[in-house]
């Protein structure tokens, strides 16, 4: 059985929510103290579930030692849905839960992942704790799994690596670190896109439609209500792409550039419009406009954490000037 390990607890208590550390009972460092694991164990009858409802009902958890049949809620003789966490707790299907922490010290800071696991009546406390630490005797434990920088997906049925759009810019980092960086970058990017769509993009497109209805009878976004933005990590400016209807010529992609410093929109004219009779889902067309002049060559990049950080793309194909005038940007006002 692992020891309590005060050093691991000290790292965790300053970086995670106090409720997540309730029931902490053990931790362990790697030989060089650059990685650690830590564990909690909490019987559900020892707490007020309402105090933990946010932690225990957040997306992403696993369970073991549970009678699977008890977790099903039958809708008819042939179909069922899984019971919620609240239902499983209320009905005594889940008896306890644990938080499993994994930490890596990288580039001067600790990166910490946590995993929520529920245990059912078929798993004793001793069995649950053994289950949580079952991999630690693996000879290369501290270089495997979440700690492994070589972690990669494989094409099903082969040993060929599958391209991982999200992780490409974080190559060489432990999977744990790259996962946290991707999550953080995604949240920041989504917040930026949401704010820019609401504050400037939607009002701008409304004005363009009112002012030039024959040219812009409608605008269609690619993913949901927000229009797709392409921007560098600095977020000093962005490209807006949308499919627009023309009163007589059909549909085509249109691109606009917005400079945050000046608050001005421009038409980006480098891509040539390709008119079609009908509108359609157009991620491949966006990449068609970008792939020959940038390092964006896969439509999966459009709904990922990726930012357009190809400086040659911005300097040569967007912001290039000739005789003091933008080569590829036209003012819209």
Image (tube, rainbow, N blue to C red):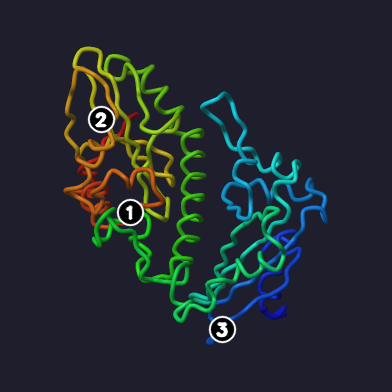
Name the residue that disc number 2 marks: 253
Q: For the view shown, which residue lies furthest in the bottom direction? A: 31
CB contact under 8 Å: marks 1 and 2? no
Image location of residue 25, percent across then percent down? 73, 72
Mark closest to the chain's N terminus, 1 or 3: 3
Residue 33 is labelled as 3
Cα distance in 3D space between marks 1 and 2: 24 Å
Going 77% across and 58% down the picture, which residue do you hit? 43
In which quadrant is the C terminus drawn? top left
Left or right position of 201 against 79: left
Q: Which type of secondary structure does the marked residue at label 1 adopt?
A: loop
Residue 280, above or below 152: above
Q: Nearer the viewer, residue 47 or 110?
A: 47
Mark closest to the chain's N terminus, 2 or 3: 3
Kindly indicate the quadrant of the structure image that contains residue 171: bottom left
Left or right position of 152 against 203: left
Left or right position of 172 against 59: left
CB contact under 8 Å: marks 2 and 3? no
Kindly indicate the quadrant of the structure image that contains residue 81: top right
Left or right position of 107 against 230: right
Q: Which type of secondary structure does the marked residue at label 3 adopt?
A: loop
Mark closest to the chain's N terminus, 1 or 2: 1
Going 67% across and 55% down the picture, which residue do you hit? 122
Name the residue that disc number 1 marks: 165
Q: Residues within 10 Å of mark 2 (few under 14, many from 20)?
A: many
Kindly indicate the quadrant of the structure image that contains residue 243: top left
Q: Which type of secondary structure does the marked residue at label 2 adopt?
A: strand
Q: Residues within 10 Å of mark 1 (few under 14, many from 20)?
A: some
């Amino acid at each position: 059985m692992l020891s309590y390990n005060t050093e691991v607890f000290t790292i965790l208590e300053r970086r995670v929510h106090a409720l997540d550390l309730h029931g902490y009972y053990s931790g362990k460092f790697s030989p060089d103290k650059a990685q650690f694991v830590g564990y909690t164990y909490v019987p559900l009858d020892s707490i007020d579930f309402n105090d933990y409802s946010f932690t225990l009902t957040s997306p992403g958890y696993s369970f073991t030692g549970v009678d699977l049949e008890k977790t099903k809620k039958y809708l008819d003789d042939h179909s069922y849905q899984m019971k919620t966490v609240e239902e499983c707790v209320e009905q005594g299907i889940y008896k306890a839960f644990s938080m499993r922490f994994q930490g890596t010290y990288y580039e001067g800071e600790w990166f910490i992942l946590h995993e929520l696991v529920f245990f059912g009546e078929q798993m004793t406390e001793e069995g649950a704790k053994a289950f949580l630490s079952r991999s630690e005797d693996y000879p290369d434990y501290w270089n495997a799994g979440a700690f492994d920088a070589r972690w990669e997906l494989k094409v099903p049925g082969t040993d060929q690596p599958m391209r991982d759009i999200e992780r490409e810019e974080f190559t060489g980092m432990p999977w744990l670190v790259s996962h946290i960086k991707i999550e953080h970058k995604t949240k920041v990017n989504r917040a930026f896109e949401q704010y820019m769509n609401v504050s400037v993009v939607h009002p701008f497109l409304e004005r363009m439609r009112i002012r030039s209805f024959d040219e812009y009878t409608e605008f269609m976004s690619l993913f949901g209500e927000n229009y797709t933005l392409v921007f560098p990590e600095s977020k000093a400016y962005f490209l807006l792409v949308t499919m627009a209807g023309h009163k007589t010529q059909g549909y085509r992609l249109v691109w606009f550039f917005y400079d945050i410093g000046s608050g001005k929109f421009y038409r980006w004219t480098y891509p040539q419009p390709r008119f079609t009779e009908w509108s359609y889902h157009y991620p491949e067309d966006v990449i068609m406009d970008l792939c020959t002049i940038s390092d964006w060559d896969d439509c999966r990049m459009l709904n990922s954490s990726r930012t357009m950080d190809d400086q040659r793309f911005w300097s040569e194909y967007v912001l290039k000037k000739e005789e003091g005038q933008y080569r590829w940007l036209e003012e819209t006002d």
